[in-house]
């Protein structure tokens, strides 16, 4: 465990994934390296783990942490490109620990924090094209409303979008305070409600800036292609929108028949199923883990196996 990030369900994830100690594994969200280390602990001399992260700070700390262990390979990349680093049908297990690390949240300059006066950035890595502020400025009111509604299930997304645009027009140097003012203006939160609302507004913007929904869908599909038969993919998600994207993507790979619903009979052959559930219901963290690490509170672990 490091101060960079405390991994969630660390032993459980490694237990589900590692069944052959001399096989190849992939951790697409290296972060502080906690899960990579737990997987590595279970590997023999011929096992290997490739770790990706889009954030150069995670890459630098991972290279320092695992220096000298030839079983670990580390690459900076968004996980939608994981196919560049592993051959088709080569992996025994892949892990996606979604969202941001504690380090990213705590580093005020990264712009994920809603402390007063923090910059509006929120890029997880250099592959994100624009900062949160640039995105807020360039997106239309409709695009903002759609993001607030669909990325965070916020009430009154149109009113919020309109208020954000209005405040942007009045503020020559916008910071996190602009979003606080917008939330206060629209929802009039009581003490204790503001932080939750702001977290959801930040989440909605962060998901756009980092194209998170597309990353999840493309990354999981690429992982299915990279898994060998019997290989497993584990995903940790931390909020309902993330979890929905994971669940929907997996559901597509569980279907035997992929014919359009309008066809009266199956013409696709009915043998398209690529994944089966290892866990019938997502696993959550224990009360003890949540007491130690509050970030574990909302975690849901889904594990699937390639058939
Ligand atoms: C929750 S943290 C992972 C923590 C890690 N499992 C550990 O034990 O420390 C998520 C990490 O994934 C990275 N990340 C998020 N989305 C990504 C993506 N689409 N491609 C690559 N890395 C991503 C973030 O930069 C962050 O470092």
Image: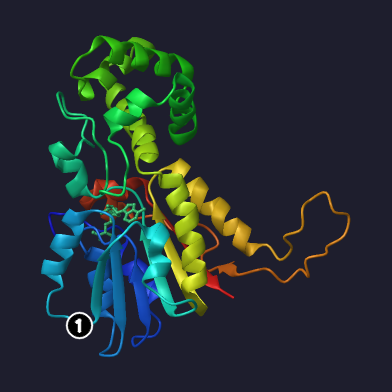
Q: Residue at x 51, y 68 (%)?
A: 224
The quadrant of the rendering that contains the C terminus is bottom right
Q: Residue at x 52, y 58 (%)?
A: 281
Residue 1 seen anywhere in this rendered image of the structure: no
Looking at the image, is 235 positioned above or below residue 14? above
Q: Position of residue 241 (x, y in %)?
A: 47, 41
Q: Position of residue 96 (x, y in %)?
A: 38, 60
Looking at the image, is 299 positioned above or below residue 195? below
Which residue is most to the right? 264
Q: Residue at x 27, y 88 (%)?
A: 44
Q: How many marks?
A: 1
- In the rendered image, which residue does mark 1 sit on? 70
What crowding class fits label 1: few (fewer than 14 Cα within 10 Å), some (14-19), or many (20 or more)? few
Image quadrant of residue 57? bottom left
* Colouring of the image: rainbow
Residue 165 seen anywhere in this rendered image of the structure: yes
Q: Position of residue 67 (x, y in %)?
A: 12, 75
Q: Which quadrant of the render holds ligand 1?
A: bottom left
The quadrant of the rendering that contains the N terminus is bottom left
- Mark 1 Cβ and ligand 1 under 8 Å apart: no
Q: Position of residue 64 (x, y in %)?
A: 11, 68
Image quadrant of residue 9? bottom left
Which residue is most to the bottom? 45
- Quick one: SS at disc 1? loop
Please indicate whether residue 200 sits to the left or right of residue 177 in the image. right
Viewer-closest of 282 and 215: 215
Viewer-closest of 210 and 39: 210
Q: Residue at x 26, y 9 (%)?
A: 170
């Amino acid at each position: 465990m490091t101060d960079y990030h405390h991994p969630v369900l660390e032993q459980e994830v490694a237990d589900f994934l590692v069944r052959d100690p001399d096989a190849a594994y992939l951790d697409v969200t290296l972060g502080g390296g906690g899960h990579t280390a737990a997987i590595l602990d279970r590997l023999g001399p011929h096992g290997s783990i490739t770790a990706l992260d889009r954030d150069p700070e995670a890459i630098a700390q991972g290279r320092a942490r695992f220096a000298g262990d030839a079983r670990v390979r580390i690459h900076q990349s968004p996980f939608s490109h994981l196919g560049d680093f592993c051959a088709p049908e080569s992996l025994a297990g892949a892990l996606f620990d979604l969202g941001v690390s504690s380090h990213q949240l705590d580093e005020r300059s990264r712009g994920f924090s809603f402390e007063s006066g923090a910059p509006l950035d929120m890029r997880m890595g250099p592959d994100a094209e624009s900062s949160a502020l640039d995105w807020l400025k360039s997106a239309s009111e409709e695009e903002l409303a759609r993001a607030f509604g669909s990325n965070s299930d916020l009430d009154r997304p149109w009113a919020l979008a309109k208020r954000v645009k209005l405040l942007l027009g009045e503020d020559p140097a916008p910071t996190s305070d602009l979003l606080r003012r917008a939330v206060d203006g629209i929802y009039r939160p009581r003490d204790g409600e503001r932080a939750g609302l702001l977290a959801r507004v930040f989440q909605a913007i962060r998901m756009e800036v980092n194209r998170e929904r597309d990353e999840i869908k493309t990354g999981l599909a690429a992982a299915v292609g990279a898994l060998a038969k019997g290989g497993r993919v584990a995903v940790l998600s931390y909020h309902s929108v993330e979890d929905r994207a994971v669940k929907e993507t997996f559901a597509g790979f569980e279907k035997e028949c992929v014919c359009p619903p309008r066809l009266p009979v199956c013409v696709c052959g009915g043998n398209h199923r690529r994944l089966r559930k290892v866990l019938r219901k997502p696993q959550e963290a224990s009360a003890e883990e949540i007491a130690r690490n509050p970030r574990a509170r909302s975690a849901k672990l889904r594990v699937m196996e390639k058939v």
